[in-house]
């Protein structure tokens, strides 16, 4: 039928075939085979046994109708990162990962991958020097027979000092720090990190003294993580938080002070040594604050009268001026408006 339509339609068919070929070529290019890599965990310490990370090299065949044969992959580890004494090598897809303990070279050879295969090779690596290490396999290098790496693969490993400074509670304050029983005060706890890297997976527990409870649901933190602080409770907890590098973050909440004592009492709230910890990329042992930090809230009893009066002088000479003060105390939850005071002064006392 195409032949019967002559040269004009033949020209159209040629164009159509050419466009289809280009589209197929683009689709195949978008699904090119490649390599990826990762570290787990991404953060380790600089001393055994907490300085080991599992390096994974992944070769994926995403080219339809193509078989990758004889892998030929080379990974040069960054200076400061070497193959562990016990490499714990894991091979895949018939290939072989080679890595000499103490060396900074990892190679993968042999093996094959059909379309859709994902081949994951693993080896343990270590570091004894704190820092952030970026490991890159550049694009353009050999991947397998007749195949090159189409896109660079990178992963970063953070190594922290085992003697990293512990997290500390640098301050615990109340504003105001002197209230009447039943009133609220804003409690602020400041967490401090003097290290050049963030302190991650940080947890804080704080138990209040008798007479102090959480006032409302407005507790907040700038440390991220999960803050558990329910109104009416006499304690709170913060988990999974991060204290920024060389910085601070805070936990704030309104607390209520209650007292039935005849005079003013002090409610000291202490965060003890060990109440603030940071796992910092490890499961054990945690870094912990070494000292106690205390903030004190003073709570005065409720006034017996809603209106009281006082003089600046108890005794005065004839003709001497002094001040008189009225104090109105609102012991309800609602604001009072339109207040007024009338006071008839005794004889011989004038304004």
Image: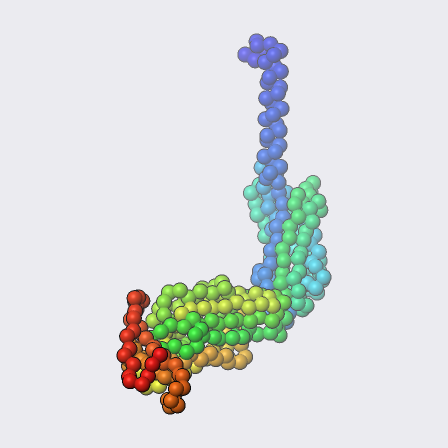
The answer to whether residue 107 is seen in the rendering is: no
| 147 with respect to 168 (left or right) | right
Tell me where residue 292 appears, x and y as whole percent.
50, 80
The answer to whether residue 188 is seen in the rendering is: yes
- Foreground residue among 84 and 225: 225
Q: What residue do we see at 50% from left, 64% from top?
A: 222
Q: Quadrant of residue 304?
A: bottom left
Number of residue marks = 0
Tell me where residue 5 appears, x and y as whole percent.
57, 10
Q: What residue do we see at 34% from left, 81% from top?
A: 350
The N terminus: image quadrant = top right
| 342 with respect to 299 (left or right) | left
Tell me where residue 141 appears, x and y as whole percent.
71, 46
| 236 with respect to 250 (left or right) | left
Tell me where residue 233 appears, x and y as whole percent.
36, 72
The C terminus: image quadrant = bottom left
- Foreground residue among 132 and 233: 233
Up the image or down, 86 lies above or below 8; here it is: below
């Amino acid at each position: 039928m195409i032949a019967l339509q002559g040269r004009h339609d033949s020209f159209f068919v040629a164009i159509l075939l050419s466009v289809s070929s280009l589209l197929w070529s683009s689709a195949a290019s978008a699904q090119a085979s490649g390599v990826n890599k990762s570290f787990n965990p991404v953060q380790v310490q600089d001393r055994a046994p907490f300085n080991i990370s599992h390096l994974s090299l992944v070769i994926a065949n995403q080219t339809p109708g193509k078989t990758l044969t004889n892998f030929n992959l080379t990974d040069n580890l960054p200076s400061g990162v070497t193959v562990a004494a016990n490499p714990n090598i894991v091979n895949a897809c018939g290939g072989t990962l080679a890595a000499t303990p103490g060396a900074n070279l990892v190679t993968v050879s042999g093996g094959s991958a059909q379309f859709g295969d994902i081949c994951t090779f693993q080896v343990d690596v270590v570091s004894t020097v704190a820092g952030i290490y970026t490991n890159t396999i550049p694009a353009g290098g050999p991947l397998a027979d007749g195949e090159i790496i189409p896109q660079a693969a990178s992963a970063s490993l953070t190594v922290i000092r085992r003697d990293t400074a512990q997290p500390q509670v640098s301050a615990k304050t109340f504003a105001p720090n002197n209230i009447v029983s039943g009133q609220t005060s804003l409690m602020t706890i400041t967490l401090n990190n003097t290290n050049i890297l963030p302190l991650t997976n940080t947890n804080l527990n704080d138990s209040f003294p008798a007479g102090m409870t959480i006032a409302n649901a407005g507790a907040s933190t700038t440390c991220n993580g999960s803050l558990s602080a329910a109104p009416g409770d006499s304690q709170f907890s913060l988990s999974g938080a991060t204290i920024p590098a060389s910085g601070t973050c805070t936990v704030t909440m309104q607390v209520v002070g209650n007292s039935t004592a005849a005079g003013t009492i002090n409610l000291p709230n202490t965060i003890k040594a060990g109440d603030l910890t940071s796992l910092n990329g490890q499961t054990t042992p945690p870094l912990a604050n070494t000292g106690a930090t205390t903030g004190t809230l003073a709570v005065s009893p409720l006034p017996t009268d809603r209106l009281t009066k006082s003089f600046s002088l108890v005794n005065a000479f004839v003709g001497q001026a002094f001040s008189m003060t009225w104090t109105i105390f609102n012991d309800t939850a609602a604001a009072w408006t339109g207040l007024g005071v009338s006071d008839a002064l005794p004889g011989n006392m004038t304004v």
